[in-house]
Image (cartoon, rainbow, N blue to C red):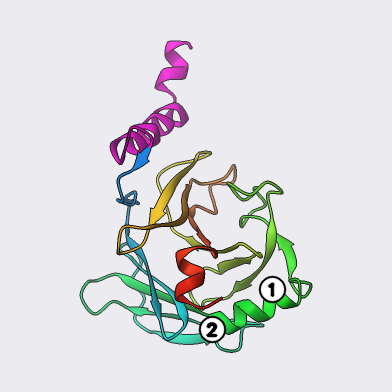
Amino acid sequence: MSKSQLRSPKTQVLAILIVASLGISSCGKGSNKNVLIDGVDGPRVNFVDNKLTMSVILKQVTIDFGLRIQIPKLPNSYVEVGPDFQSAGYMISVGIDANDLKALTHDGFNTLDPTSLPGGRPLPGVVEGQMPGLAVEIPKWHNLAFYFGADVFGTFVPVKLPIKDVIGTFRFYDGAGDRIGNISVVGKDANDKNSGFLLLVNLHGKVGQLIQL
């Protein structure tokens, strides 16, 4: 590798991601610690009232109003956004009802179109690069994307990140320190857009038991 390649922003960012992954793991075993994302507090995943909930605070987003929206085709699930009470950031909360997930599984996801990352890049960690999905429009902000499969539920949260053309994937743990999926830090695409993070939660094992799938 040439010196110019070593100095390129893409190579430097990739090196940072590799160091980060080594710093939170040891001897091939996870450390039960989630990777830190620039400008993001979380995400955190919990299980309440037979719902899989995810919450995150975007530190660099300031919007002075909040609302709760039903997720299309998921009558008992929601997205809630609004100013965070404990900081100047913007809180996003997602609640996915287990009955909605069961209904989608029963229907074979036929009502949802195959969807990749916003902007068209393949989904990391997914063999086909896409999954049945949908988007939820958030006024004065960006769309959230949701992905549904027989074995996995995912959500993409758009966040402005200072990296480009790089996607780093890490193990993701719940508050009890148990691994429940993967989280991918997604850099900007060739058009300097569509950065954020993708959380994919395994619907078998602990998660399936807690929300009674």
Depth-wise, is mark 1 or mark 2 nearer the camera?
1
Identify the mark nearer the N-term, 1 or 2.
2
The answer to whether 183 appears left or right of 88 in the picture is right
In the depicted structure, whether residue 86 falls above or below residue 173:
below
Q: Residue at x 74, y 61 (%)?
A: 114
Q: Is residue 141 visible?
A: no
Q: Are marks 1 and 2 in contact (CB under 8 Å)?
A: no
Task: Count how many numbered circles sit on residues in the image.
Answer: 2
- Which SS does the magenta portion mostly show? helix
Residue visible at 54% across and 69% down in the picture: 144
Q: Is residue 22 above or below residue 45?
A: above
**Is residue 8 located in the magenta-colored stretch of the structure?**
yes
To which residue does mark 1 refer?
105
| Residue type, mark 1 in image | Thr
Q: Who is closer to the viewer here, 211 or 38?
A: 211
Outermost residue toward the right?
A: 110
For residue 77, which numbered disc appears in the image? 2
Residue drawn at x 20%, y 75% as measured from the top left: 86
Which element type, helix, strand or loop, lies under badge 2? Answer: loop
- The quarter of the picture where the C terminus appears is bottom right
- Residue projecting furthest to the left: 86
- The amino acid beneath tag 2 is Ser
Q: Which residues are magenta?
A: 1-28
* Residue 34 drawn at (x, y percent): 33, 52
Q: Which residue is found at the position 47% from the left and 31% from the top? A: 10
